[in-house]
């Protein structure tokens, strides 16, 4: 695979970074993940806005231009992808190279940029049959709204879930369900759709926000209000949203079967509204 590293397009096994890059040493960087349909980046403007916000929040002084589009187009071409390929486009920016110190470098550093485009088909089985998830303590930092490359707590929660026989984990903070390890979560109860508000406790997902728009445009009742863990037993439907998931149903949470492990009607409707938008 050809990747982009600090201005160069190279084979991934020939690309390298300086060991003193602060992303490598301190996870001092931010990233974005995009979905590409028919050769076009889905919700490019929204992703760019969020990426710029993440940079600003970490005080990495860089203003995004159209480099994101240019890098993507070159990677698409150099890897001979086709418009029919479903792709995932990843880009990260770190504060750059400096000897290890928690304080930011005094001298201005060149940011480090790494990007790749890989094939990523929707997980059809999960999309059609649903996921089984568990709950896990949300022991991440309190700035989950920043798309920071430090993802240890997310990785650990996901792996623990897999080791326990689940597909993923839903984080619980102060008795409230926040989001999943790499996606947002929605619940349906008595025809009202609930999702956690876009606070510092969750990443404000581009897919989440698009699904909220779909709900509002199509007359679904939606509340940005969190579900407490004790209400799990009474919900009718649940689903995850994310760049690589679109709207993927949840059929089991811990030992609780949701809607007899069948995909709920509201979830199905949102899946089809999403697909219609992509046509
Ligand atoms: N994850 N919440 C978390 C913690 C995430 O990492 C993600 C995305 C989302 C969904 O955001 P969006 O709809 O914008 O993809 C929510 C990406 C895909 C990842 O880490 O690979």
Image (cartoon, grey):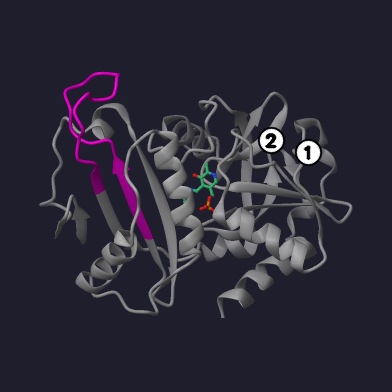
**Distance Cα–Cα, label 1 vs label 2:** 9 Å
Residue 229's spot in the image, x, y percent?
A: 75, 32
Crowdedness near tag 1: few (<14), some (14–19) or many (≥20) residues, C-alpha within 10 Å = some
Q: Image quadrant for the C terminus?
A: bottom right
Identify whether 23 is placed above or below 186: above
Q: Which structural element holds mark 2?
A: strand
Mark 2 sits on what residue? Answer: 177
Q: Is 161 positioned to the left or the right of 66 in the image?
A: right
Q: Is 252 positioned to the left or the right of 168 in the image?
A: right
Q: Is 118 positioned to the left or the right of 50 in the image?
A: left
Residue 25's spot in the image, x, y percent?
A: 25, 27
Observer-side mark, 1 or 2, equals 2
Crowdedness near tag 2: few (<14), some (14–19) or many (≥20) residues, C-alpha within 10 Å = many
Identify whether 241 is placed above or below 203: below
Q: Is residue 107 magenta?
A: yes
Q: Which structural element holds mark 1?
A: helix
Q: Residue at x 82, y 46 (%)?
A: 235
Residue 65's spot in the image, x, y percent?
A: 33, 58
Disc sitting over residue 173 in the figure: none
Q: Does residue 166 appear anywhere in the picture?
A: no
Q: Is residue 78 magenta?
A: no
Number of marks present in the image shown: 2
Label the magenta part by its dominant secondary structure.
loop
The residue stretch that appears in magenta: 89-113
Disc sitting over residue 232 in the figure: 1
Q: Residue at x 50, y 40 (%)?
A: 162
Depth check: give the residue in front, 26 or 136: 26
Q: Are marks 1 and 2 in contact (CB under 8 Å)?
A: yes
């Amino acid at each position: 695979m050809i990747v982009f590293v600090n201005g160069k397009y190279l084979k991934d096994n020939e690309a390298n970074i300086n060991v003193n890059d602060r992303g490598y040493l301190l996870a001092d960087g931010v990233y974005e993940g995009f979905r590409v349909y028919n050769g076009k980046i889905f919700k490019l403007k929204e992703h760019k806005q969020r990426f710029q916000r993440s940079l600003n929040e970490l005080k990495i002084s860089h203003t995004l231009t159209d480099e994101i589009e240019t890098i993507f187009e070159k990677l698409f071409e150099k890897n001979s992808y086709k418009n029919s390929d479903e792709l995932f486009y990843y880009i990260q920016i770190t504060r750059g190279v400096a000897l290890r110190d928690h304080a930011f470098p005094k001298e201005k550093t060149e940011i480090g940029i790494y990007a790749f485009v890989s094939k990523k088909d929707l997980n059809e089985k999960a999309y059609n049959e649903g996921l089984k998830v568990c709950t896990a303590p949300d022991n991440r930092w309190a700035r989950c709204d920043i798309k920071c490359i430090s993802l240890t707590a997310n990785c650990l929660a996901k792996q623990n879930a897999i080791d326990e026989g689940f597909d993923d984990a839903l984080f619980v903070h102060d008795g409230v369900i926040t989001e999943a390890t790499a996606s947002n979560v929605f619940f349906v109860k008595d025809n009202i759709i609930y999702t956690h508000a876009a606070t510092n406790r969750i990443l404000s997902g581009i897919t989440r926000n698009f699904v909220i728009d779909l709900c509002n445009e199509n007359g679904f009742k939606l509340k940005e209000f969190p579900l407490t863990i004790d209400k799990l037993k009474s919900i009718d439907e649940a689903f995850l949203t994310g760049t690589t998931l679109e709207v993927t149903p949840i059929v089991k949470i811990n030992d609780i079967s949701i809607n007899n492990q069948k995909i709920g009607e509201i979830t199905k409707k949102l899946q089809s509204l999403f697909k219609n938008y992509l046509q």
